[in-house]
């Protein structure tokens, strides 16, 4: 299994975060791991946490919520809405940390097919201001993103 690097880019002119990551799996497989709640719970976030799905309706107009637990204790929860769900192509959702309900991110995920049955995932996250964006970046989100995508690599390799 190839180790892929995750690129996290903060635009200096607009309050966005872009995450780019390649996977040794098809767009269909990577997409499914984002919309199937059982799969999503297995890979999202850092290794030190478990994810518990509270609500999950992965369709245009649907909603979602999950909590992160450590040693059986809830330490964070997140929620949002699915604004657009296009199989194997694109997901647009809101992403809100319950502890910062005014810091809603609008995220667009695209699944680009690459040669060899591989996928490039691009996530563009737009927030209301630079303070919110910089707070997200300073929160340690890179650890959760990197470890989560490493877990997704492992999950996809098992399913292959």
Image: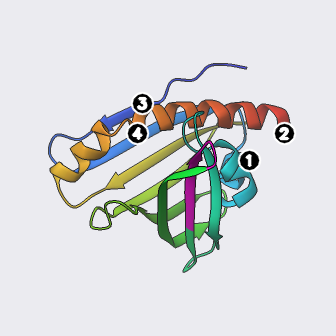
Residue that badge 3 annotates: 7
Q: Residue 90: where, in percent of width, then height?
A: 55, 59
Q: Determine if residue 115 is in view.
A: no
Residue that badge 2 annotates: 159
Helix, strand or loop at label 4? It is: helix
Q: Nearer the viewer, mark 4 or mark 1?
A: 4
Residue 89: within the magenta?
A: no
Q: Which region of the structure is painted magenta?
A: 65-72
Residue that badge 4 annotates: 141
Labels 4 and 1: the sequence-earlier one: 1
Q: Residue furthest bottom?
A: 61
Q: Nearer the viewer, mark 4 or mark 3?
A: 4
Q: Nearer the viewer, residue 13 or 41?
A: 41
Split into 4 quadrants, where in the image is the C terminus?
top right
Labels 4 and 3: the sequence-earlier one: 3
Q: Residue 83: where, in percent of width, then height?
A: 49, 73
């Amino acid at each position: 299994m190839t180790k892929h690097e995750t690129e996290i880019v903060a635009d200096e002119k607009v309050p966005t975060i872009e995450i780019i990551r390649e996977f040794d799996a098809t767009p269909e497989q990577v997409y499914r791991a984002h919309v199937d709640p059982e799969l999503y719970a297995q890979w999202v976030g850092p290794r030190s946490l478990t994810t518990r799905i509270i609500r999950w309706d992965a369709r245009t107009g649907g909603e979602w919520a999950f909590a992160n637990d450590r040693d059986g204790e809830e330490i964070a929860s997140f929620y949002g809405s699915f604004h657009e769900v296009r199989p194997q192509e694109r997901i647009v959702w809101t992403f809100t940390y319950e502890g910062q309900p005014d810091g809603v991110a609008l995220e667009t995920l695209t699944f680009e097919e690459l040669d060899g049955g591989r996928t490039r995932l691009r996530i563009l996250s737009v927030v209301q201001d630079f303070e919110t964006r910089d707070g997200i970046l300073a929160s340690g989100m890179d650890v959760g993103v990197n470890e989560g995508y490493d877990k997704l690599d492992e999950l996809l390799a098992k399913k292959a």
